[in-house]
Image (tube, rainbow, N blue to C red):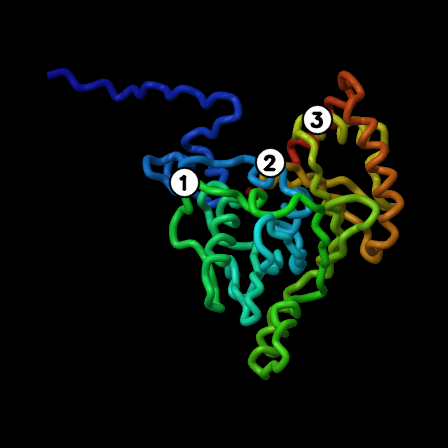
Amino acid sequence: MAKKSRTRTPSAPAATGEVGPRQPCPCGSGKRYKACHGAAGGAAPTFVARPFEGMPSECDVIALRELVPAATAPLTLKDGDRRVRLATLLPGAAPAMVRDSGDIWLGLQVQHSYGNPARDLGAVLEAALATGEPGVVGLRSAPGEGPVLQDLISDTTLDITVHDGFDYWIDDIPERDANMEAALEQANGGVMPTSRLTSVEAAYWTNVGSKEHLRWVMPHPEDTLLDALARLHAAGQDSVAEGSRLVGMFRAHGLLAPVWDLPVGTGAEVLEEPAARFAADLAQALDAGELSAAERSARAGLANRQVTIR
């Protein structure tokens, strides 16, 4: 009997915009797509590339979820008068907490990987609204179909407060014991100083010790933004402070966040005016026709310096 051919039939390439079976799953799990969201009965039926689209302050929400250590913002519900507080991180990385007062705290930096973090947040918020008991609220399985977070809250711009640490974890507790203070001190020890610029949206200065960075989440489509950044880079107009350097960008939840290295000692205050000027230059560069040869070269360099977070 003749042996069966061991030649494999090549698999069809993924269509534009699709994820190949051997590529990393876009949910951030670290698994290949075919073993995660691409598997039969995988972690979620659908991966949503831009889950927070349509949410007020979408770019800031992405920054708070991925880049900012400690920040909070009040949320206003479309229905009901319960007070809800959005936070970067809650104690124990809890998805949500119902406080003794009945207030709801909703955490952004959680490990749910069900394909749509906005749906996860919506489901957690609904569960917190339904419970009458103080405590931690989370998801044990994929939430299924239902409202995303932006369906449940008003469409007003978020009033974001960046904190020096996690003291907001216990700011509603009048009497604090030594264990609380010790846990808080330990958590605060890992917080990198961070400030939100006021002259532009979703731009955050941070000091990581050996360097300072400006990380700026932008709402524009990726290809359009890359073209504009390439134009500014080729023209020498991509600086946000003396000695700054555009070193690359993060990709998270469907948007890009350019990153600048800054000289140590720059601080956040001096970035306000040049950041506003850069935003004006970028607005002009977003619709400036075909790229020149130098701009195409700059674009290729920028495209090679992207890191996908989620």
Q: Is residue 182 left or right of residue 264?
A: left
- The residue that appears at 61% across and 56% down in the rendered structure is 86
Q: 264 and 124: which one is in front?
A: 124
Q: Looking at the figure, which quarter contains the N terminus? A: top left
Amino acid on which the number 2 mark rests in the picture: Gly
Mark found first going from the N terminus, 1 or 3: 1
Q: Is residue 111 left or right of residue 272?
A: left
- Up/down of 237 relative to 209, above or below: above
Q: Is residue 48 left or right of residue 164?
A: left
**What residue sits right under mark 3 in the picture?**
224
Q: Residue furthest left?
A: 1
* Numbered disc 2: secondary structure: loop
Separation (CA) of disc 1 from disc 3:
30 Å
Amino acid on which the number 1 mark rests in the picture: Ala
- Residue 59, given in percent of the width and then of the height, sits at 68, 43
Amino acid on which the number 3 mark rests in the picture: Thr
Mark found first going from the N terminus, 3 or 2: 3
Q: Are marks 1 and 3 in contact (CB under 8 Å)?
A: no
Tell how many labels. 3
* Numbered disc 1: secondary structure: loop
- Residue 60, given in percent of the width and then of the height, sits at 68, 47
For discs 1 and 3, the disc positioned in front in the rendered view: 1
Q: Is residue 241 left or right of residue 101?
A: right
- Up/down of 163 relative to 211, above or below: below
The answer to whether one can see residue 236 in this image is yes
Q: Are marks 2 and 1 in contact (CB under 8 Å)?
A: no
**What residue sits right under mark 1 in the picture?**
44
The answer to whether one can see residue 209 in this image is no
The answer to which image quadrant residue 173 occupies is bottom right
Label for residue 254?
Answer: 2
* Numbered disc 3: secondary structure: helix
- Pointer 3: residues within 10 angstroms few (<14), some, or many (20+)? few
